[in-house]
Amino acid sequence: MFEKTLYLVRHAQPDTPAGEQLCLGQTLDLPLSASGLSQARALGRFFCGLGVEAVYTSPLLRARQTAACIAGDAAAPRVLDSLIELSGGEWDGLSFDLIRARYPEYFGPSPRRSCPPGGESDAQGLARARAALAYVAQRTDRCAVMVAHAGLNRLLLCALLGRPLDEKKRIPQGYAAVNTLRYVEGAWHVLQVDGGPARPSEPAAEGVPGPAGGGEARE
C-alpha cells in the first residue's frame, strides 16, 4: 500500500513585545523567544530518527528558526512562500485588545464581518495551503515536515477534516504543535492534531481535534 506522512507544524513561540497577544500576519517578522527556541529544539529531538526527507518552511523568521532546529545538521529547510501566514491587512502587528476596540463589528455573538480589512480571506488562505500540501507531497517519497502558522494550519485542517472553515478557531494549534497527515490510497487522513513534544496531546481520531491549545487565529 502506497503511503506518505507529512507533519504540519506550527512555529514555536515568538518574542512579542512585553508578551502581548498580537495579530502576527505577514508584516511583523519577529524572532523566537527564549521559550520558543527551547520548544524548537524539542521539536528537533522529536523528529530525529523519523526519517524526515526534507523540511519546508514559511519565509517568516519565527517559522524559519523553528524549521532550522527541526532540520538540524541535515539539508537546510526549503522556504515555500505558500506556507506564509494569512495576511491580517490593517490588523497586522496590532494587539487583539486594540483590534477589538477599533473593529467591534468583527466580534460578538453575531459578527457582521470576518476577513480583516485589507487582509486575506479564508478561501484565499486555504487555496495557498492546499497548493503547499500538493507541492510538498509531489516531492516527498515517504516523510516531510512543513512549518507554517496557526491561521494557515487551521484552515487546512478544517478542510481535511471536512469541517466548515468558520469552525477554524475550534482547531487547537499551540506553539510548536505537530499535526500528522497521512496519504493513503489517494486520500489524506488527519491522524493527530496539536501533538508533539510541547503539547499535552493524545492521538485524535479523524474528525476529532485533540486538546485545546493556545494562540490566536493569525500567528
Image: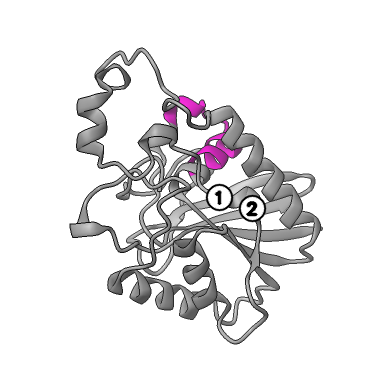
Q: Amino acid at mark 2?
A: Asp
> Is 150 placed left or right of 185 in the picture?
left
Q: Position of residue 157 (x, y in %)?
A: 54, 42
> Is 141 placed left or right of 177 in the picture?
right
Whether label 2 touches label 1, CB < 8 Å: yes
Give the residue displayed 68% in from the left and 49% down from the top.
132
| The N terminus, quarter of image | bottom right
Compared to residue 150, the image places residue 74 above or below, namely: below
Is residue 104 visible in this depiction of the protein? yes
Task: Give the quarter of the image for residue 54.
Answer: bottom right
Task: Give the quarter of the image for residue 100.
Answer: top left
What range of the chain is rendered magenta? 154-167
> Is residue 158 inside the magenta stretch?
yes
Is residue 1 visible in this depiction of the protein? no
Give the residue displayed 28% in from the left and 58% down from the top.
16
Furthest-bottom residue in this view: 73
> For numbered disc 2, what is the local secondary structure?
helix
- Judge by depth and name the residue closer to the eye, 96 or 127: 96
Q: Amino acid at mark 1?
A: Ile
Q: Disc 2 marks which residue? A: 81
Compared to residue 47, the image places residue 212 above or below, namely: above
Q: Position of residue 66 (x, y in %)?
A: 47, 69
The chief SS type of the magenta part is helix
Q: Disc 1 marks which residue? A: 84
> Is residue 165 inside the magenta stretch?
yes
Q: Position of residue 165 (x, y in %)?
A: 50, 28
- Judge by depth and name the residue closer to the eye, 161 or 146: 146
